Image (cartoon, grey):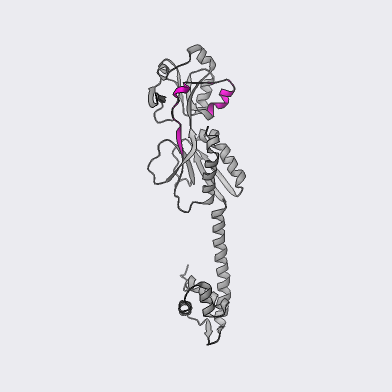
Amino acid sequence: MDNLKADLQAVRLFVQVVDSKTFRAAAAALGVPKSTVSLRVAQLEDQLGERLLERTTRRLRLTDAGAAYYRSAVAALEELRDAERMLTERKSRPAGRLRVTTTIEGGQFMFAPVFAEYLRRYPDVELDVLLADRRVDLIEEGVDLAIRGGELPDSGFVAYRLKFHGSLRFYASPGYLQARGTPRHPRELERHDCLVMSGQREPLAWKFNIAGRTSVVRVRPRALANSFVVLGEFARAGHGIAMMPSTVASSSVEAGALREVLAAFAPAKGVLHAVYPSARHLSAKVRALLDLLEELGPSAGQ
């Protein structure tokens, strides 16, 4: 594209002079010195190589070139204002495509209701939810926001702590507990079959809150899986004790298919963060999701 000869601010000053009929009135309308208006319009004429205004002591008159330029300039400035209004509206009203990522089961059991509510409130947003039990590259994969638990690497991204939390508890079927006994202390797990989440960083090191301190107990796996849903199925079938989120186990507990054990030693609730590339010029669609996560966090995170 060829470089523009005219300075945009000078064009605006020229249009204001024509609309105001005099340099003095234009200067007053814009809150700048009259000398500045006169100088910038003269510079505009020099840049264009055309005389735009005929100046007399009493009034201004547009030249033929000035009249043609004025009509085009007014139309162009109005299009620019429309473009600015469009961007302002997009910033204030959630719209466009929003790509969000979280873990598979976190999305299914904890955040699916939030995403559904988001769609209800913001019909102009095209929501794209990516569920993956891997570290998604936000930049490479075009993700606007990720919901992540555990320790966060120093990525340079913004991390916003959510009211949601990951609550890991311990469950077994009534049949298993009747046959093998109910453990009263984490130390007793060495005599039990344990159902282990293989996707965790240290799957055989289960953490407990013992006497107000976090203690680690090594467990013996009867089975491993990288899905809490699968571990829940194993536990309901009586194959051992599973550590899994309360959101995954809640329906089975209500149905009597699972019972919680070692509740007095449950570990501290895990922290979840919303991670996004930058806080600068945060779009309305991302801000709206952050606000909704804040709003729904306490009730959904129990």
Residue 97, percent from left and from top: 55, 49
The one of 212 and 63 positioned closer to us in this rendering: 212
Given the current orientation, which residue lies at the most extreme top position? 179
Compared with residue 83, is residue 142 higher up or lower down, i.e. above or below?
above
The one of 56 and 128 positioned closer to us in this rendering: 56
- Res. 204 visible in picture: no
Which residue does the image show at 56% across and 51% down from the upper left? 96
Q: In the image, is 89 to the left or to the right of 276?
A: right
Given the current orientation, which residue lies at the most extreme bottom position? 57
Range of magenta residues:
248-272
Confirm whether the magenta stretch covers residue 12: no
Which residue does the image show at 53% across and 14% down from the upper left? 175
Residue 54, percent from left and from top: 53, 85
Residue 184, percent from left and from top: 45, 17
Which residue does the image show at 58% across and 37% down from the upper left? 113
Compared with residue 137, is residue 40 higher up or lower down, i.e. above or below?
below
Compared with residue 175, is residue 287 higher up or lower down, i.e. above or below?
below
Confirm whether the magenta stretch covers residue 269: yes
Which residue does the image show at 55% across and 73% down from the upper left? 73
The image quadrant that residue 187 belongs to is top left
Residue 72, percent from left and from top: 57, 73
